Protein backbone atom coordinates (compact mmCIF):
# COMPACT_ATOMS: atom_id res chain seq x y z
CA UNK A 1 0.00 0.00 0.00
CA UNK A 2 1.11 3.56 -0.63
CA UNK A 3 0.07 4.87 2.78
CA UNK A 4 0.75 4.32 6.51
CA UNK A 5 -2.01 2.05 7.81
CA UNK A 6 -0.71 2.20 11.40
CA UNK A 7 -0.96 6.00 11.42
CA UNK A 8 -4.49 5.86 10.01
CA UNK A 9 -5.58 3.52 12.83
CA UNK A 10 -3.92 5.68 15.50
CA UNK A 11 -6.81 7.50 17.21
CA UNK A 12 -4.36 10.03 18.64
CA UNK A 13 -2.67 10.66 15.31
CA UNK A 14 -3.91 14.24 15.03
CA UNK A 15 -3.29 16.26 11.90
CA UNK A 16 -0.77 13.81 10.36
CA UNK A 17 -3.43 11.09 10.61
CA UNK A 18 -6.01 13.16 8.72
CA UNK A 19 -3.51 14.01 5.99
CA UNK A 20 -2.61 10.32 5.65
CA UNK A 21 -6.31 9.33 5.50
CA UNK A 22 -6.80 11.74 2.63
CA UNK A 23 -3.70 10.41 0.90
CA UNK A 24 -5.08 6.88 1.23
CA UNK A 25 -8.46 7.86 -0.16
CA UNK A 26 -6.72 9.31 -3.23
CA UNK A 27 -4.38 6.35 -3.67
CA UNK A 28 -4.77 5.36 -7.36
CA UNK A 29 -4.66 1.61 -6.59
CA UNK A 30 -6.20 1.11 -3.15
CA UNK A 31 -8.16 4.35 -2.71
CA UNK A 32 -11.85 5.21 -3.00
CA UNK A 33 -13.01 5.41 -6.65
CA UNK A 34 -15.17 8.47 -5.96
CA UNK A 35 -12.37 10.36 -4.20
CA UNK A 36 -9.89 9.47 -6.94
CA UNK A 37 -12.17 10.95 -9.62
CA UNK A 38 -12.53 14.35 -7.94
CA UNK A 39 -10.68 17.53 -8.86
CA UNK A 40 -10.50 21.09 -7.52
CA UNK A 41 -13.62 22.22 -9.38
CA UNK A 42 -15.76 19.27 -8.31
CA UNK A 43 -14.80 19.63 -4.64
CA UNK A 44 -15.19 23.44 -4.47
CA UNK A 45 -19.01 23.34 -4.00
CA UNK A 46 -18.57 21.00 -1.02
CA UNK A 47 -16.04 23.43 0.47
CA UNK A 48 -18.58 26.25 0.28
CA UNK A 49 -21.32 24.03 1.69
CA UNK A 50 -19.19 22.98 4.67
CA UNK A 51 -18.40 26.62 5.48
CA UNK A 52 -22.12 27.36 5.63
CA UNK A 53 -22.73 24.36 7.85
CA UNK A 54 -20.14 25.76 10.26
CA UNK A 55 -22.00 29.09 10.24
CA UNK A 56 -25.30 27.28 10.78
CA UNK A 57 -23.99 25.40 13.82
CA UNK A 58 -22.69 28.65 15.30
CA UNK A 59 -26.02 30.41 14.71
CA UNK A 60 -27.86 27.56 16.46
CA UNK A 61 -25.21 27.50 19.21
CA UNK A 62 -24.89 23.77 18.55
CA UNK A 63 -21.40 23.44 19.98
CA UNK A 64 -21.17 19.65 19.75
CA UNK A 65 -22.13 19.87 16.09
CA UNK A 66 -19.67 22.71 15.56
CA UNK A 67 -16.75 20.41 16.42
CA UNK A 68 -17.86 18.00 13.72
CA UNK A 69 -18.60 20.74 11.17
CA UNK A 70 -15.18 22.33 11.71
CA UNK A 71 -13.67 18.92 11.06
CA UNK A 72 -15.63 18.66 7.82
CA UNK A 73 -14.35 22.08 6.78
CA UNK A 74 -10.78 21.17 7.72
CA UNK A 75 -11.10 18.06 5.55
CA UNK A 76 -11.83 20.32 2.58
CA UNK A 77 -8.47 22.08 3.04
CA UNK A 78 -6.73 18.72 3.32
CA UNK A 79 -8.56 17.45 0.22
CA UNK A 80 -7.52 20.41 -1.95
CA UNK A 81 -3.99 20.25 -0.60
CA UNK A 82 -3.67 16.53 -1.38
CA UNK A 83 -4.71 17.16 -4.99
CA UNK A 84 -2.22 20.03 -5.18
CA UNK A 85 0.51 17.79 -3.78
CA UNK A 86 -0.23 15.13 -6.40
CA UNK A 87 0.11 17.81 -9.10
CA UNK A 88 3.41 19.02 -7.65
CA UNK A 89 1.98 22.45 -6.75
CA UNK A 90 2.32 22.59 -2.95
CA UNK A 91 1.77 20.49 0.17
CA UNK A 92 0.09 20.98 3.55
CA UNK A 93 3.18 22.48 5.17
CA UNK A 94 3.27 25.08 2.39
CA UNK A 95 -0.36 25.98 3.10
CA UNK A 96 0.23 26.31 6.84
CA UNK A 97 3.42 28.33 6.37
CA UNK A 98 1.70 30.63 3.87
CA UNK A 99 -1.15 31.55 6.22
CA UNK A 100 1.25 31.86 9.15
CA UNK A 101 3.49 34.23 7.19
CA UNK A 102 0.44 36.25 6.11
CA UNK A 103 -0.87 36.63 9.67
CA UNK A 104 2.53 37.74 10.97
CA UNK A 105 2.95 40.19 8.07
CA UNK A 106 -0.53 41.66 8.50
CA UNK A 107 -0.19 42.16 12.26
CA UNK A 108 2.94 44.28 12.73
CA UNK A 109 1.30 45.80 15.83
CA UNK A 110 1.41 42.33 17.43
CA UNK A 111 4.45 40.62 15.90
CA UNK A 112 6.51 43.66 14.83
CA UNK A 113 7.61 47.06 16.07
CA UNK A 114 4.37 48.97 15.49
CA UNK A 115 2.41 50.23 18.47
CA UNK A 116 -0.83 48.53 19.49
CA UNK A 117 -2.02 51.89 20.82
CA UNK A 118 -4.43 52.75 18.01
CA UNK A 119 -8.13 52.36 17.32
CA UNK A 120 -9.74 49.38 15.63
CA UNK A 121 -10.61 51.72 12.74
CA UNK A 122 -6.96 52.70 12.29
CA UNK A 123 -5.92 49.06 12.43
CA UNK A 124 -8.49 48.30 9.71
CA UNK A 125 -7.05 51.08 7.54
CA UNK A 126 -3.54 49.75 8.08
CA UNK A 127 -4.76 46.24 7.20
CA UNK A 128 -6.15 47.53 3.91
CA UNK A 129 -2.87 49.28 3.10
CA UNK A 130 -0.99 46.01 3.64
CA UNK A 131 -3.49 44.09 1.48
CA UNK A 132 -3.24 46.73 -1.26
CA UNK A 133 0.55 46.31 -1.27
CA UNK A 134 0.10 42.53 -1.49
CA UNK A 135 -2.25 42.94 -4.47
CA UNK A 136 0.25 45.22 -6.21
CA UNK A 137 2.98 42.64 -5.68
CA UNK A 138 0.75 40.06 -7.41
CA UNK A 139 0.00 42.41 -10.33
CA UNK A 140 -3.55 42.69 -9.01
CA UNK A 141 -3.48 46.39 -8.23
CA UNK A 142 -7.14 47.03 -9.08
CA UNK A 143 -9.25 48.01 -6.09
CA UNK A 144 -11.72 45.17 -6.70
CA UNK A 145 -9.29 42.59 -8.09
CA UNK A 146 -9.21 40.13 -5.19
CA UNK A 147 -12.88 40.18 -4.18
CA UNK A 148 -13.59 36.52 -4.85
CA UNK A 149 -16.05 35.78 -7.64
CA UNK A 150 -17.24 32.62 -5.89
CA UNK A 151 -18.59 34.42 -2.82
CA UNK A 152 -22.36 34.39 -2.22
CA UNK A 153 -23.83 37.28 -4.22
CA UNK A 154 -24.98 39.35 -1.24
CA UNK A 155 -21.64 38.99 0.50
CA UNK A 156 -19.70 39.83 -2.66
CA UNK A 157 -21.88 42.91 -3.32
CA UNK A 158 -21.13 44.17 0.16
CA UNK A 159 -17.41 43.58 -0.21
CA UNK A 160 -17.32 45.28 -3.61
CA UNK A 161 -19.13 48.32 -2.26
CA UNK A 162 -16.98 48.49 0.86
CA UNK A 163 -13.79 48.26 -1.19
CA UNK A 164 -14.96 51.00 -3.59
CA UNK A 165 -15.99 53.21 -0.66
CA UNK A 166 -12.46 53.10 0.73
CA UNK A 167 -11.24 55.04 -2.29
CA UNK A 168 -14.11 57.54 -2.12
CA UNK A 169 -16.62 55.93 -4.51
CA UNK A 170 -19.64 56.08 -2.21
CA UNK A 171 -22.76 58.11 -1.45
CA UNK A 172 -21.93 60.60 1.31
CA UNK A 173 -25.44 60.56 2.76
CA UNK A 174 -27.76 57.66 3.52
CA UNK A 175 -30.74 59.60 2.13
CA UNK A 176 -29.15 59.32 -1.31
CA UNK A 177 -29.10 55.52 -0.94
CA UNK A 178 -32.79 55.52 -0.02
CA UNK A 179 -33.55 57.73 -3.05
CA UNK A 180 -31.68 55.24 -5.23
CA UNK A 181 -33.80 52.38 -3.85
CA UNK A 182 -36.94 54.30 -4.86
CA UNK A 183 -35.47 54.92 -8.31
CA UNK A 184 -34.49 51.26 -8.81
CA UNK A 185 -37.91 50.08 -7.59
CA UNK A 186 -39.58 52.30 -10.16
CA UNK A 187 -37.30 51.01 -12.92
CA UNK A 188 -38.11 47.42 -11.93
CA UNK A 189 -41.84 48.18 -12.15
CA UNK A 190 -41.31 49.71 -15.59
CA UNK A 191 -39.34 46.65 -16.70
CA UNK A 192 -42.17 44.40 -15.52
CA UNK A 193 -44.54 46.39 -17.70
CA UNK A 194 -42.35 45.74 -20.73
CA UNK A 195 -42.57 41.97 -20.29
CA UNK A 196 -38.84 41.64 -21.00
CA UNK A 197 -37.63 39.03 -18.52
CA UNK A 198 -33.95 39.81 -19.10
CA UNK A 199 -34.57 43.48 -18.38
CA UNK A 200 -36.58 42.61 -15.26
CA UNK A 201 -33.74 40.40 -14.01
CA UNK A 202 -31.23 43.19 -14.55
CA UNK A 203 -33.35 45.77 -12.71
CA UNK A 204 -34.06 43.32 -9.89
CA UNK A 205 -30.31 42.79 -9.49
CA UNK A 206 -29.76 46.57 -9.39
CA UNK A 207 -32.40 46.87 -6.65
CA UNK A 208 -30.80 44.10 -4.58
CA UNK A 209 -27.38 45.71 -5.02
CA UNK A 210 -28.52 49.09 -3.70
CA UNK A 211 -30.41 47.46 -0.79
CA UNK A 212 -27.14 45.78 0.18
CA UNK A 213 -25.57 49.25 0.04
CA UNK A 214 -28.23 50.59 2.42
CA UNK A 215 -27.37 47.80 4.83
CA UNK A 216 -23.69 48.67 4.60
CA UNK A 217 -24.44 52.32 5.43
CA UNK A 218 -26.46 51.12 8.44
CA UNK A 219 -23.60 48.80 9.47
CA UNK A 220 -25.82 45.78 8.78
CA UNK A 221 -24.35 42.67 7.18
CA UNK A 222 -26.73 41.78 4.34
CA UNK A 223 -25.90 38.08 4.38
CA UNK A 224 -26.47 37.80 8.14
CA UNK A 225 -29.67 39.85 7.96
CA UNK A 226 -31.17 37.70 5.22
CA UNK A 227 -30.09 34.51 6.98
CA UNK A 228 -31.90 35.74 10.12
CA UNK A 229 -34.98 36.57 8.04
CA UNK A 230 -34.89 33.07 6.55
CA UNK A 231 -34.74 31.56 10.04
CA UNK A 232 -37.65 33.71 11.20
CA UNK A 233 -39.73 32.71 8.17
CA UNK A 234 -38.95 29.04 8.84
CA UNK A 235 -39.97 29.31 12.51
CA UNK A 236 -43.25 31.04 11.73
CA UNK A 237 -44.19 28.74 8.87
CA UNK A 238 -43.42 25.74 11.07
CA UNK A 239 -45.80 27.21 13.66
CA UNK A 240 -48.49 27.41 10.94
CA UNK A 241 -47.92 23.75 10.08
CA UNK A 242 -48.07 22.72 13.75
CA UNK A 243 -51.32 24.60 14.39
CA UNK A 244 -52.93 23.18 11.29
CA UNK A 245 -51.72 19.67 12.12
CA UNK A 246 -53.41 19.99 15.53
CA UNK A 247 -56.66 20.34 13.59
CA UNK A 248 -55.81 17.43 11.28
CA UNK A 249 -55.15 19.90 8.48
CA UNK A 250 -52.14 21.12 6.47
CA UNK A 251 -51.09 24.20 4.48
CA UNK A 252 -52.24 22.51 1.27
CA UNK A 253 -55.70 22.05 2.79
CA UNK A 254 -55.83 25.58 4.22
CA UNK A 255 -56.22 28.98 2.56
CA UNK A 256 -54.23 32.21 2.66
CA UNK A 257 -56.61 33.92 5.11
CA UNK A 258 -56.28 31.15 7.71
CA UNK A 259 -52.51 30.85 7.28
CA UNK A 260 -52.07 34.63 7.48
CA UNK A 261 -53.98 34.67 10.77
CA UNK A 262 -51.71 31.95 12.15
CA UNK A 263 -48.67 33.88 10.88
CA UNK A 264 -49.78 36.93 12.85
CA UNK A 265 -50.34 34.71 15.88
CA UNK A 266 -46.77 33.47 15.57
CA UNK A 267 -45.58 37.09 15.50
CA UNK A 268 -47.54 37.91 18.65
CA UNK A 269 -45.93 35.09 20.61
CA UNK A 270 -42.46 36.03 19.39
CA UNK A 271 -41.83 33.24 16.89
Image (cartoon, grey):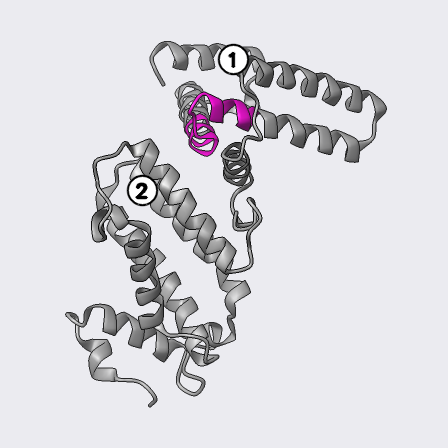
Q: Is residue 197 positioned above or below 109 on the image?
A: above
Badge 2 element = helix
Badge 1 element = helix
Say whether disc 1 or disc 2 marks the residue closer to the N-terminus: 2
Q: Which residues are magenta?
A: 211-229
Q: How many marks?
A: 2
Q: Is residue 213 positioned above or below 81 on the image?
A: above
In the rendered structure, does residue 141 fall within the stretch colored magenta?
no
Q: Position of residue 175 (x, y in %)?
A: 56, 12
In the rendered structure, does residue 228 fall within the stretch colored magenta?
yes
Q: Nearer the viewer, residue 101 or 68?
A: 101
Q: Nearer the viewer, residue 238 or 100?
A: 100
Q: Nearer the viewer, residue 249 or 17?
A: 17
In the image, taking residue 160 as reference, residue 243 lies left or right, namely left
In the image, taking residue 150 as reference, residue 82 lies left or right, namely left
Q: Is residue 88 positioned above or below 42 on the image?
A: below
The secondary structure making up most of the magenta span is helix
Residue in the image at 53% along x and 16% along y = 174
**Quadrant location, the C terminus:** top left
Q: Nearer the viewer, mark 1 or mark 2?
A: 2
CA distance for labels 1 and 2: 30 Å
Q: Kindly identify which numbered label has been placed on residue 57.
A: 2
Q: Position of residue 7 (x, y in %)?
A: 21, 79
**Quadrant location, the N terminus:** bottom left
Residue in the image at 28% along x and 70% along y = 18
Q: Residue furthest left?
A: 12
In the image, taking residue 142 as reference, residue 238 lies left or right, namely left
Q: Kindly identify which numbered label has been placed on residue 260.
A: 1
Q: Position of residue 217 (x, y in %)?
A: 48, 23
Q: Position of residue 127 (x, y in %)?
A: 37, 44
Residue in the image at 59% along x and 15% along y = 176
Q: Nearer the viewer, residue 71 or 166?
A: 166
Amino acid sequence: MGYDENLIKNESGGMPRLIEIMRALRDPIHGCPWDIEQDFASIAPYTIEEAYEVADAIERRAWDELKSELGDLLLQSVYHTQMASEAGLFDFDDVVNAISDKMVHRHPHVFGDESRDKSAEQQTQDWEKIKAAERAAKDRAGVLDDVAIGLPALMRAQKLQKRAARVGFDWPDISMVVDKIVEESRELAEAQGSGDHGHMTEEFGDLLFVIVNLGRHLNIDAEEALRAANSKFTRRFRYIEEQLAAKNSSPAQSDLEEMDALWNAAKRIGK
